[in-house]
Amino acid sequence: MKYFKTNKFLLIGVCLLIALLQGRLEGSNNLKTLYFYNPETNIDNFAILKKEFDLYFAQYGEFYITPFSKMDAFEQTMTATQEGLFLVSSWHFKTLMKAKKLKPLLIGVIKGGSTHKKVLVVEKKIASLEALRGKQVASSSSKEYTQGILKEMLETNHPDVTSSLRIITVPKDMDALMSVTFGMAESALTTQESLEQLALLNPTHHKRLTVLALSDELLLPIVSISNSSMDPAKPLIGILERMGADPAAEEQLRMLGLDGFRPLSAEDKKRLER
C-alpha cells in the first residue's frame, strides 16, 4: 500500500510537470504569432496580408501573423490568450492597456516619425462645423474609431454636431476624400499625409477642399506584450524591429501603412499615458 501511495504521488507530480511544460510550450507558440487589429485602416484582403507576412516571417522560423477584421473577435482572442504579442492602433491600445495589462514595446514609423494627425475635410463651400449637422462623414477607419476621434476633435465645442454625424465606411483614405468631391459625403476624416498626396495626384480636386478641424498628434500603431516574460518574445520583436531596414519587407509594411517599427521613446510613452 505504501508503495502504491508513493507511486501515486509520483504520477501526480509527473502530470503536473507535464502540464506546466505544456503551458510554457503553448505560451512560447503564442509568442511566435503577432495578433493584429487596427480600426484605423480598412484592409482589402486579410488572406493576402497573412500570406505575405507569413512568407516573410518564414525565413526566420515558425512565426506568423493573425489579423482580425472585427474588434470583438480580436478582444475575445486577447482574453483567451494567456500571453501574446499584439499590434493595435494607439487609440485602441489606450482602451486595452489597463484591463489587459499590456506593455508597449515598439511603435510604427512613417517617414521617421511616430505620430500623425487626422483632418476633417470638407468642400470650401462649407464654412463651419454647424453646417455639417446631420451630414455624412466618409472614413476608411471603423465606425468605433471614427466616432472616437471625432469626439476628441469636436466634442468640447460642438457635442451636438458630433453625435449627429453619419459615418460611411470606404476602403481607403483617398476614397474618403474623393467621396467629398464627388458629392457622396459632405466631409471626410483622413490623414494630413493623404490630403497632401491628393494635392500631388489630383490638384483640381484638392483645390476644392479645406480642413475644417485638425486632431492633436496621434501615435502610430503599437506592438505590445501581454502577461509574458520578454525572453521568448525577443525573436519576433527583433524581426519586426529590423523590417524597416529590409527592402524585402517593404510590401508587407505598406499593407499596414507603415515604414517600419522602433522602440518607443520617452515622449511616446508620455503620450500614451495622457
Image (cartoon, grey):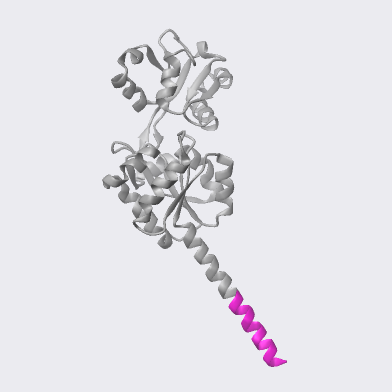
Which image quadrant: the N terminus? bottom right
Q: Quadrant of residue 273?
A: top left
Q: Residue furthest bottom?
A: 2
Q: Quadrant of residue 126?
A: top left
Chief secondary structure of the magenta span?
helix
Residue 62 position (above or below residue 37): below
**Residue situated in front as seen by the camera: 81 or 174:** 174
**Residue situated in front as seen by the camera: 71 or 152:** 71
Where does the image place residue 119, in percent across and percent down from the top left? 41, 23
Q: Is residue 3 part of the magenta span, yes or no?
A: yes
How many numbered badges does the structure rendering display?
A: 0
**Range drawn in magenta:** 1-15
Q: Is residue 123 part of the magenta span, yes or no?
A: no
Residue depicted at x 69% and y 87%: 5
- In this picture, residue 150 sits left or right of residue 265: right
Residue depicted at x 59% and y 47%: 76
Where does the image place residue 152, in percent across and percent down from the top left? 49, 28
Residue depicted at x 50% and y 20%: 137
Where does the image place residue 14, in percent across and percent down from the top left? 59, 78
Where does the image place residue 93, in percent across and percent down from the top left? 49, 42
- Asked if residue 25 can be seen in this view, the reply is yes
